[in-house]
Image (cartoon, grey):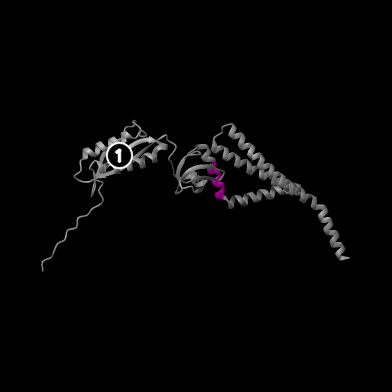
Amino acid sequence: MEEYFKAEFLIGLVATYGPKLLGAIAVLVVGLYITGILTKLVKRALEKSETDVALQTFIGSMINVILKIMVYITAFSVLGLPMTTFIAILSASFLAIGLALSGTLQNFAGGVMILLFKPFNIGHFIQAQGHMGTVKEIQVFNTILHTPDNKVIIIPNGGLATSSMTNFSMMPTRRVDWTFGIAYGDDVDKAYEVLNRLIEADERILKDPAPFIAVKELGDSSVDFVVRAWVNSGDFWGVFFKMNEQVYRTFDKEGLSIPFPQRDVHLYQQKS
């Protein structure tokens, strides 16, 4: 008899809550599927409207999160939970989660600040939080960088929005600085002539502002020249490396030596 009542109780439980549970699961599956489709449609619409690329990523992530929250709320309502009770529980949960995830909320606020003030955009090369790389995505909570050696760096937006950062791509031109040394006794005028010739030979170096060459320092082992030239930002590293190579090749041909550190040692013999 006891087993009969248990079986009847289980059958009644399944009959009462089974359809609701299946309905809630169906809402979750279908709702999350539709959420993925709607998110893609929104991203495509933003792309067609030529919205800023950083804003596209941010809005897409935001809509995805909001839609998922709505799906979960709908699934709980299908289960038959009173919405007032559910909302109260949800509010308390959000408060607890907010306190526990205060850093995450800071990252969200940082993402909003980045989009509003635009210290960088997609495709810019930046240095921040001890990392350097090209900005690939600006998400709700994080910014994704790709390093020159193809590593992926994920930086929280909170620290990125509130700390110092260097943007190498924002300005259209950059100044390239070199320091080249010649040995004491070498012809200084010859060094000026060779450096000017090498600068004029590189068409990527801009004429305005004009390049600058001067004796910077009389070092321990060399006479050091400072060379400064302006280039388009995208040409910076190409010009920098090529000039180093050209100076090394040309100085030797022109009889100018690139010295290395030297030290004179004097030995004294003590008379006994």
Q: Residue furthest right?
A: 1
User: Vertical placement of 70 versus 48: above or below?
Assistant: below
Q: Quadrant of residue 230?
A: top left
Which residue in the structure is indicated by mark 1?
227
Q: Secondary structure at mark 1?
A: strand
Under mark 1, the amino acid is Val
Q: Quadrant of residue 61?
A: top right
**Looking at the picture, how far across and down is residue 75, in whole percent?**
73, 47
* Front-lying residue, 196 or 13: 196
Answer with left or right where residue 30 lies relative to residue 264: right
Q: What span is colored magenta in the figure?
A: 102-111
Q: Residue furthest bottom?
A: 272
Q: Quadrant of the C terminus?
A: bottom left
**Looking at the picture, how far across and down is residue 236, in whole percent?**
39, 39
Q: Residue furthest front?
A: 253
Residue drawn at x 50%, y 42% as measured from the top left: 135
User: Vertical placement of 220 versus 226: above or below?
Assistant: below
Q: Residues within 10 Å of mark 1 (few under 14, many from 20)?
A: many
**Looking at the picture, how far across and down is residue 197, in whole percent?**
28, 35
Answer with left or right where residue 135 lies relative to residue 210: right
Main SS of residues in magenta? helix
How many marks on residues?
1
Answer with left or right where residue 200 lies relative to residue 86: left
Task: Look at the image and say whether residue 121 sits in the magenta stretch.
Answer: no
**Looking at the picture, how far across and down is residue 117, in whole percent?**
50, 37
Residue drawn at x 19%, y 58% as measured from the top left: 265
